[in-house]
Amino acid sequence: MNWNERIKRWLDFEGLDQETRMSLDLLMEDEKMAEDAFYQDLTFGTGGMRGEIGPGTNRMNIYTVRKASQGIADYIKANGEEAKNRGIVIAYDSRRMSPEFAEEAAKTFAANGIHTYLYSDTRTTPQLSFSVRYLHAFMGVVITASHNPPEYNGYKVYGEDGAQLNLEDADRVIEFVSRVEDELVISNDGYNPEMLVSIGETLDRAYIQNALTVCEQSAATPIQAVFTPLHGASGSTVKRLLEEAGYSDIVYVPEQMEPDGEFPTVASPNPEEAGAFELAMRYGKDSGADLLVAVDPDGDRVGIAVSNGDHYELLSGNQTGAILIEYLLSQKKSKGELPDKGRIFKTIVTSEFGRAVGEAYGVQTADVLTGFKFIGEKLRENDLTGEFEFLFGYEESYGYLIRDFARDKDAVQSVLLLVEAAAYYKTQGKNLRDVLIELYNRHGWYREALVSVTKKGADGAREISALLNSMRELPLQSIAGIRVSTIEDYETQNRIFTDLEKSEKIELPQANVLKYFLEDGSWVCLRPSGTEPKVKFYFSVKGSTEQESDEKLELIKDSFLDEVNKR
């Protein structure tokens, strides 16, 4: 069925709601946009689905949400009565249509005889993860598009362990969703209200009590800090947590504390970007704050800025991760609580900086594929084997997990530990930037960069695919005049040693990722985004000085991107 036939099917459907029909009529005025909205079904992948809100099979709307929910409901029913009785938990963030999509999903599950827990208001993604575990539910769903622009929303799926589905379970769910052929005819009108339970305060209290356990200090030390949830779901939870932990000098950015899916005071609600800190910096200067903290809309990623004289300097996810590792391990070592089997996890596109910090304390760091679900998978395996004691998990894209009562990155518990770390180092006359410089001087000057190129629509998807194919067919021999010593191709799961002319198997799951290691220890990685229409290029170098690393990073980055542009 081509895109014109899909549109006709929607136009001919008598049960189409009036708002969607009006939007569809407007869409028909732009053939290119109409094709993009209908040329495919919105991809339901290993983490769920994400897309622009609007009419169409390739958009987030009540019909595509019902389709995904019906497929998941069929999967739950296939797992028997116990799975149906344990049920599913649903949470949602502050985005456009999030409450409506959550309600549609909840009614669809309830209509299928599945016990359904629905949060009565916005909650964070990590709290959804925690709630699945706390309620011993069979699955979980959170309606969110993280830090995407306002026109996006998404649907993330969680397993019974509270982590995003592992690849095997995700494939089974995807199969069930793909069997649902017609999103328009799914009805949830006849659901049994008794199957749908509203949840809230009881789980809030339980989550806060667990989050307080990340503290390494027995009592809070005063610290001036500014916090903003960027109009997202974490504001009230973080405020409550910090107050219960004893931090009374926190300034909360008032213009951004209330959930608002239009994100009216920021160009992008992304804590990776300086613009997201604009208001926080203003309040920071007024209050003399040592630390600024910003959390993304669904509360799973956190960024910080630290005072550097007369301005605030944003730290990267790699830098913040290294600081948190240093603080955690140093505190545990001083108390004699550093476990023999302690383990840190990071993704393959995350800097080696954190590994170097961990090794100084005798703690091993293991790599996983990009995506926090792979850290969650390791935690699930460890529940059975007891092979290690989890100490920390993180990724360069500002996601951290300290205690695994949640099984996804958790900005809420991370905010508390960052505030505590800043307060602790302040008693030593240092801020977090000072700690970072000490770590660089101790372990080497690691520098990283990320370049994302947006490729929207069908044409963009084809361009990204063609680029990866070209890089495989004509592999690079050198970058910026530095020889490529190893190529890791996670699609073929081969590690190729170019200088030794041999290869070995990569013991990680298959993924469309290429990573180049250079003779000097630098590396470059490219991968399509799993959640956005982008191709991402990661760069990492290490030098003996800041200037050496900065110069090397720019040289390698420019050389590689020049090569990409020729493809």
Image (cartoon, grey):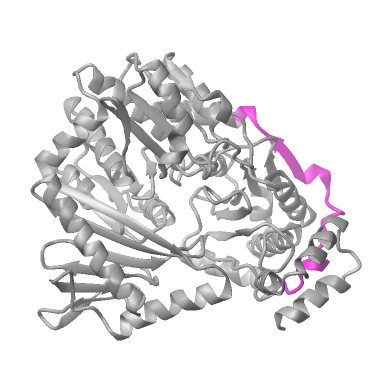
Q: Nearer the viewer, residue 455 or 371?
A: 455
> Would you place residue 105 above or below residue 465 in this image?
above
User: Residue at point 28% right, 84% down?
Assistant: 474
Q: Nearer the viewer, residue 116 or 232?
A: 232
The verdict on residue 490 being magenta is no
The N terminus: image quadrant: bottom right
> Residue 178 location in percent, x, y?
65, 72
Rendering quarter of residue 506: bottom left
Decide if residue 375 is on the left or right side of residue 539.
right
The verdict on residue 199 being magenta is yes
Q: Nearer the viewer, residue 287 or 298?
A: 287
Q: Is residue 123 visible?
A: yes
> Residue 460 location in percent, x, y?
51, 73
Q: What range is drawn magenta here? A: 180-202
> Residue 447 location in percent, x, y?
22, 50
> Residue 419 location in percent, x, y?
36, 25
User: Residue at point 19% right, 67% down?
Assistant: 517
Rendering quarter of residue 491: bottom left
